[in-house]
Image (cartoon, grey):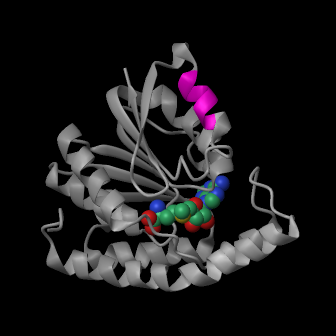
Amino acid sequence: MSVLTDTALQARIDGLQAASIAQEAETNRYFSERAKKGDLSWDGLDAAANRFMADKLVALEPIKAEFCHMLCRALRATRVVEIGTSYGVSTLYLADAVRANGGGVVIGTEYEPAKAAAARASFEAAGVAHLIDLREGDLRETLKDLEGPIDFVLMDIWTEMARPALELVHPHLRPGAVIVADNTTGFRHAYRHFFEFVAEPKNGLTTMTLPFDGGLEMVVKG
Ligand SMILES: C[S@@+](CC[C@H](N)C(=O)[O-])C[C@H]1O[C@@H](n2cnc3c(N)ncnc32)[C@H](O)[C@@H]1O
């Protein structure tokens, strides 16, 4: 049973999820071949890897996106930030939750122009564009003028961006806000700077790694 009540939206998401899954084998092959050659650094994608990923959806898995939807409903979230939008699959879930909460905004972030254009078209077609403020460009610039209070953050980004993004959203989190970060077990080492920030007592955060595939971090602002 889906958390979404809009069947047309669910059908759109199903199509995008299928497109994302269809790209996975090629993506896995690309990174495993590069890893075999020993020319991969988890401290950041190089120019070749960025070019390769420029048309990849890498959509958040449905079970995780549905979990985020449920958290947004539980929090009565009306101000949500999505770190990493791509073609906007998770954004559609978040916008649906915000709509069900009575309206608000999902602030999205994407630096690939073609992905941002595809996401915008999808938001229009799904009838949720009015709920989404997609900020195009490098999130280290586009999130500088963020306004709070923020209820919920989805961190679904190349891992080297997790800490810079967290530093930008952190001052605007309301007490009880939740941050969900994807793949924190699979990419633990690459997330290390993020975890250093989370562990800093003055930042007032508590965290738990939930046993979703690859690990899903749930961080709560005290
Ligand atoms: C894992 S994908 C997001 C998937 C999306 N949440 C979904 O479920 O459909 C991460 C995205 O972040 C984008 N990205 C990476 N670094 C970025 C940066 N510094 N600023 C903005 N976007 C960035 C990538 O282009 C990629 O599309």
Is 46 on the left or on the right of 95, as rendered? Answer: right
Q: Position of residue 198 (x, y in %)?
A: 54, 28
In the image, farthest residue toward the top:
202
Q: Position of residue 160 (x, y in %)?
A: 68, 48
The quadrant where residue 38 appears? bottom right
**Residue in view at x 59 percent, y 33 percent:** 195
Residue 196 is a magenta residue: yes
The quadrant where residue 220 appears? top left
Q: Magenta part of the protein: which range?
A: 194-199
Q: Position of residue 51 (x, y in %)?
A: 74, 75
Q: Position of residue 26 (x, y in %)?
A: 63, 83
Identify which residue, 165 or 208, lies in the foreground.
208
Q: In which quarter of the image is ligand 1?
A: bottom right
**Residue in view at x 62 percent, y 38 percent:** 163
Image quarter of the C terminus: top left
**Residue in view at x 28 percent, y 67 percent:** 128
Identify which residue, 202 or 150, lies in the foreground.
202
